[in-house]
């Protein structure tokens, strides 16, 4: 049994404001995909405003960016939702239709003590560290995961099939 949970942040830069018709498909998917995430096995928490999502959160030095910050029970639970859930995959497969390529890491994972809810500032630090230093136990990716601080070193096998090949 671990005393750690996995936090993740991913950011996206819409090609137009979310109020434009080009991103209606994305805006329409927010409530149902968030509901699926909230009910997913291993889901613990997500950053949200009173609107029920985090699209109004401004961070990372660019007011146009969308921030998604969540905590999950395990890397496996997060990976299952991100890369295996049909509702999430349908949005993920369309990301090039409405979002710009950032040209650098846009997602980072890190371990947090059970019950900890990270701040946007903490997420910004982790993403900046990943961008500057590459994957480490402090900030990593699905492609280069690190075990929880109290987990066995060989507990990360078999995750290569998580990658979205959309």
Image (tube, rainbow, N blue to C red):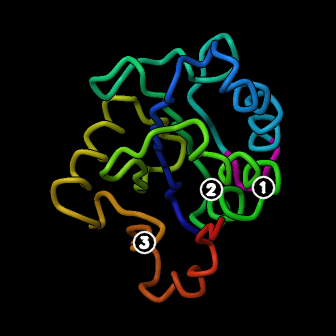
Q: Which residue range is magenta in the image?
A: 39-43
Relative to 25, say whether 6 is above or below. Answer: below
Q: Is residue 94 left or right of residue 106?
A: right
Secondary structure under tag 1 reads: loop
**Image coordinates for residue 3, horizontal then vertical, percent:** 51, 59
Q: Main secondary structure of the magenta part?
A: loop
**Image coordinates for residue 143, horizontal then vertical, percent:** 44, 73
Find residue 145 and name its label: 3
- Please identify the quadrant where the C terminus is shown: bottom right
Residue bearing mark 2: 73
Find residue 5 and name its label: none
Query: Contact (CB < 8 A) between labels 1 and 3?
Result: no
| Residue 123 sits in quarter | top left
Residue extending furthest toward the left: 132
Mark 3 burial class by Cα count in 10 Å: few <14, some 14-19, many 20+: some
Residue bearing mark 1: 41
Query: Contact (CB < 8 A) between labels 1 and 2?
Result: yes
Q: Is residue 67 left or right of residue 104?
A: right
Residue appearing at x 43%, y 36% in the figure:
118
User: What is the spatial separation of the Cα atoms under label 1 and label 3, in whole angstroms?
Assistant: 20 Å
Residue appearing at x 81%, y 35% in the figure:
35
**Image coordinates for residue 85, horizontal then vertical, percent:** 78, 57
């Amino acid at each position: 049994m671990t005393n750690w949970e996995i936090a993740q942040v991913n950011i996206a830069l819409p090609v137009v404001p979310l109020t434009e018709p080009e991103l209606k498909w994305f805006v329409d998917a927010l409530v149902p995909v968030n509901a699926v995430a909230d009910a997913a096995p291993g889901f613990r928490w997500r950053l949200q405003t009173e609107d029920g999502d985090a699209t109004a959160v401004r961070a990372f030095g660019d007011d146009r960016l969308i921030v998604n910050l969540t905590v999950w029970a395990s890397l496996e639970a997060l990976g299952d939702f991100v890369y295996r859930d049909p509702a999430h995959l349908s949005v993920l497969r369309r990301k090039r239709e409405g979002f710009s390529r950032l040209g650098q890491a846009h997602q980072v994972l890190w371990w947090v003590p059970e019950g900890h809810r990270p701040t946007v500032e903490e997420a910004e630090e982790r993403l900046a560290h990943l961008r500057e230093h590459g994957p480490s136990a402090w900030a990593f990716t699905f492609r280069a995961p690190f075990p929880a601080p109290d987990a066995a070193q060989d507990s990360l096998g078999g995750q290569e099939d998580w990658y979205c090949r959309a």
